[in-house]
Image (cartoon, helix red, strand yellow):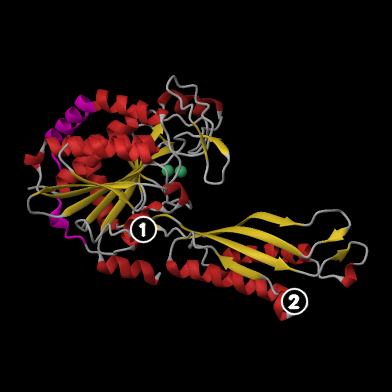
Amino acid sequence: MKYIAFITSVLCLASSSLSYATTSASSNNAKLVNAVMPELMTLYMDLHQSPELSSVEFNTAKKLAKTARALGFEVTEQVGGTGVVAVLKNGQGPTVLIRADMDALPVKEQTGLAFASKVITTTEEGLQAHVMHACAHDTHMTSWIGTAKLLSENKENWSGTLVMILQPAEERGRGAKDMIADGLYKRFPKPDYALAFHNSASLKAGVIGYTPGFTFANVDSVNILVKGVGGHGAYPHATKDPIVLGARIVGALQTLVSRELDPQDPAVVTVGSFQSGTKHNIISDQALLLLTVRSYSDETRQTLLDGIARIAKGEGIAMGLPEKLLPEVIVKDEYTPATYNEPEFTKKMAQLFTVELGKERVIEVPAVMAGEDFGRYYKADNSIKSMIFWVGGVPFDKWQSAKETGEGLPSLHSPFWAPDARKVIATATQAMNSAVLTILAK
Ligand SMILES: [Zn+2]
Ligand SMILES: [Zn+2]
């Protein structure tokens, strides 16, 4: 809990600094968004048909960089790989960062849409793969352009600096890290506020969901290499069986969350893969366990990682293994930090969105254990007030029939995920535009 107390004490938003839009301002925002929707939908369909995998978003980045440049932004390409930074300076005032992610997934689209992706490419691993915007980052990018357009065309209504970024490789948890490492906060104006949204496959189209505080989890990948002494399955006494030891470790790991953490502190330790052996009658000499480990605070993360190492080693000792054969625990460096929505700022933005969209379209939702590398923008500098929110994409008819039939809806990353893109893009663009106009009010 120390972590939360620290953040809330450091980040204290001056409540008087953000005033809310009036109803007339919000209907004006809605009108402005409606006027740009036809061209945004054309862009959306184009992006949807030309998805690119993580870190190779070359054409996407080039295309959108060109559009941002035409809107009057100062655009720098190839920041942290294919990342794009578009800056618009418009007088005195704070700096607001808006992020959209660009990457698609190796999924074969089965939405049946007229503009479905038919792209096939070669992955980093040399495999042939279909590519689809199955996480609908195409809606994020389209709204990003919509927001850039509205704000660049209405510069008389705000004062400050806009830093709009297109981030590569979100799906690999790498893009934000690479852009920050490439000088995002040094080569470009450092943001006071950071905003992003993600489309949601569990909210009705056009509904905004927000979570003050932690909203996405710390994500660690951990390998446990269980060593043993192999031999004949009929002579187990002459071996040290890594499958038995691995199974003990898997069992003991279940007590980490259930017996070592406060029940109010959510966490996950999942063994997603357990590989060992080749044949019925051979005792293998090693097993490999692959774990995903999820938490919110830094402290809980450390408790879990320390616990995994202790349990693996302890079970090895209990098995009677010599020091050199004790299990090896490797915490992979693919860590994605938890995403923290600064609570005061988040609540103010939620109130603003309520004025904009009506209270039935803005709801508080629980945090999730999924990962999002947007958390890095805040993690790299705790003085930035940051917020990511959900924008519902489930089409009304699908929502209704799922309710009536009890059948599930496709999730993000599903080959069937076809959000109501028009609603997602219009809602997100209106929300972002109003957020910036409020934060950078003259
Ligand atoms: Zn995704
Ligand atoms: Zn995503």
Q: Quadrant of residue 145?
A: top left
Above or below residue 250? Residue 169 is: above
Q: Which residue is disc 1 drawn over?
A: 376
Q: Residue at x 55, y 36 (%)?
A: 129
Q: Give the mark nearer the N terminus: 1 vs 2.
A: 2
The amino acid on which the numbered mark 1 sits, given as a three-letter code, is Arg
67 left or right of 2 in image: left
Q: Residue at x 32, y 70 (%)?
A: 6
Q: Which residues are magenta?
A: 13-36
The amino acid on which the numbered mark 2 sits, given as a three-letter code, is Ala
Q: Position of residue 166 (x, y in %)?
A: 31, 45
Q: Which residue is disc 2 drawn over?
A: 318
Q: Tell which of 26 and 232 is nearer to you.
A: 232
In terms of secondary structure, where does tag 1 sit? helix
Residue extending farthest top: 114
Q: Quadrant of residue 247?
A: bottom right
Residue extending farthest bottom: 323
Q: Residue at x 68, y 62 (%)?
A: 250
Using the rendered image of the protein, determine whether residue 118 is visible from the camera's viewpoint: yes
Q: Is mark 1 within 8 Å of ligand 2?
A: no
Above or below residue 27? Residue 332 is: below
Above or below residue 272? Residue 261 is: below
